[in-house]
Each structure stands twice: as structure tokens, then as C-alpha cells.
């Protein structure tokens, strides 16, 4: 996959701009949109993403995963989560580093990165995928009331070169993108190994109230499967469960 980098002084949202290119027929696989300043960056759901201008990585990449069935689109989330994990692991080590389902990168129970994947399905295939990434890198203070943001610099004590870091992430992403085509099972297994609280007892909340359970696996649709303290299997989609 050829990477084509477009850099902007400011975009309200790199994902929104990428989706406009898709809608206008101007999108191409491997196109990366990076913004120095992103005042209306989007997180998952209705969440916003705080990013001090010039301190972090905020970018989106456009892919054309026609080879992937829409029912297996969660592999794209696994792909970018693993790419971010690998790059951060080289700096902070694997201990205390994990992927919090579905796609947040956590270190010592603090959030370093978030991902927003937006797919366009045409017929029975994935036509386009826009993957937005916010990785906190050199920002030392956060002003919003987000519960647990942190940056690489908080733990490494070193300021990162953003351009080099982006190149590294895109290289890892390309590696895992090829893996989806050739060995999707190993990608899914690797994601599961890195998952926050995998196999551990923890407290959760759903619409019925609080309960204790442990994560057993992720199914092919990206749903979270837990076994509760009474032995019942529980299945959740995104935003249907809260980690306590």
C-alpha cells in the first residue's frame, strides 16, 4: 500500500474531511490526513478528543478493504489497535500497556490513544474505511474533564518527533493490513492477548446494573464476551457495557 500524506494546519476533524473525500469520489487508498490543529476532533460515539496543537498525533487514513466481508470489519479496529500498541511498546514496554476494548490504548490505567473507525459498505463488501487516530504524545496538561488522559511524555520523560512517530505507526499498520488478507486468525489472537482485563475478574455495569465478570474473548463481530460470577455468558456491543 502506497502512503500519501496530506498535512493541514487545521481541520475540524480529519475523519470528517476524509469522509468528504470519499463522498466526492476523490479518496484513494493509503491517503493520510494529518492536522496540526484539530479543534473538533471526534472520539467514539459523541465524545470529543482534546489535543493541544502541535503536541500530538491526530490523523486519519483511508483504506479500501474490498477483500474483507462487512461482518469481519472489526479486524480493522484490531489492526490499528495493534499497530499503536507495537509502537508505544517500543517506548514504554509491554508491562502495564493494554488495549481496552474496543480500541483505546491504555498505560497504567490511563488513556494514551483513541481510535474512530467509520466504514462505508456498498452491497456485500466494504467499500471504504476511514480510520481516525488520536495519540497523546507531548502534551503535558489536559484541560477537559476527560477522566484519565495521559501522554507518552508523562511516562517516558522524552519529547517525541511526531513525523518519525507517524511513519512508524503507518509502517506497522501496513504490516497488519497485509496480515488481515493472509492470516486474520493470528491478528485476532494477538489482539486478544493484548486486551485489557483479559481473563481477569473485574466489575462492570450494563443497563441492568453492576456485576462481576471476566472477559473470555471477542467474537468475529467485535462483540465483547464475558462470563459472570454465576457462570452466565454475557455478550455486549459497543457502548452497552461500562468498565468499573
Image (spheres, rainbow, N blue to C red):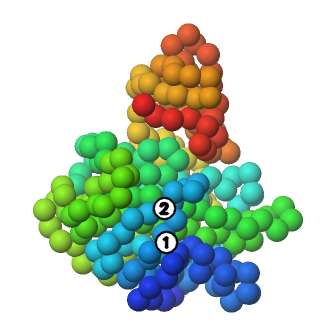
Q: Residue at x 67, y 81 (%)?
A: 20
Determine which residue is flagged by label 1.
Answer: 40
Determine whether the residue tagged by mark 1 lies in a helix, strand or loop: loop
Give the vertical position of 117 relative to 8 (above or below).
above
Q: Do the residues under discs 2 and 1 have CB atoms within 8 angstroms?
A: yes
Q: Residue at x 65, y 76 (%)?
A: 19
Residue 165 shows up from this direction: no
Q: Nearer the viewer, residue 69 or 204?
A: 204
Residue 167's spot in the image, x, y percent?
37, 78
Q: Residue at x 82, y 68 (%)?
A: 122
Q: Give the residue at the far right of this rendering.
A: 123
Q: Quadrant of the C terminus?
A: top left
Q: Position of residue 76 (x, y in %)?
A: 58, 59
Residue at 74 percent across and 71 percent down: it is: 127
Q: Quadrant of residue 7?
A: bottom left
Q: Which residue is mark 2?
A: 48
Q: Residue furthest top?
A: 230
Rendering coords of residue 175 (x, y %) = 48, 67
Amino acid at each position: 500500500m502506497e502512503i500519501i500524506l496530506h498535512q493541514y494546519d487545521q481541520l475540524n476533524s480529519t475523519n470528517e474531511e476524509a469522509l468528504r473525500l470519499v463522498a466526492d469520489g476523490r479518496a484513494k487508498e493509503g491517503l493520510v490526513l494529518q492536522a496540526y490543529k484539530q479543534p473538533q476532533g471526534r472520539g467514539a460515539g459523541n465524545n470529543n478528543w482534546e489535543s493541544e496543537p502541535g503536541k500530538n498525533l491526530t490523523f486519519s487514513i483511508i483504506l479500501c478493504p474490498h477483500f474483507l466481508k462487512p461482518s469481519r470489519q472489526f479486524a480493522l479496529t484490531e489492526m490499528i489497535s495493534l499497530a499503536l500498541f507495537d509502537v508505544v511498546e517500543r517506548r514504554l514496554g509491554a508491562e502495564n500497556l493494554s488495549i481496552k476494548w474496543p480500541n483505546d490504548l491504555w498505560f497504567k490505567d490511563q488513556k494514551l490513544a483513541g481510535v474512530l473507525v467509520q466504514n462505508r459498505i456498498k452491497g456485500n463488501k466494504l467499500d471504504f474505511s476511514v480510520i481516525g487516530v488520536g495519540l497523546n504524545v507531548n502534551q503535558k496538561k489536559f484541560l477537559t474533564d476527560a477522566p484519565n488522559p495521559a501522554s507518552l511524555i508523562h511516562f517516558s520523560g522524552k519529547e517525541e518527533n511526531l513525523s518519525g512517530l507517524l511513519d512508524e505507526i503507518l509502517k506497522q499498520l501496513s504490516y497488519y493490513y497485509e496480515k488481515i488478507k493472509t492470516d486474520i486468525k493470528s491478528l485476532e489472537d494477538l489482539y486478544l492477548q493484548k486486551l485489557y482485563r483479559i481473563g481477569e475478574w473485574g466489575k462492570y455495569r450494563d443497563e441492568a446494573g453492576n456485576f462481576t465478570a471476566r472477559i473470555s474473548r471477542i467474537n468475529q463481530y467485535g462483540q465483547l464476551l464475558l462470563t459472570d460470577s454465576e457462570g452466565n455468558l454475557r455478550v455486549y456491543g459497543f457502548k452497552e457495557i461500562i468498565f468499573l
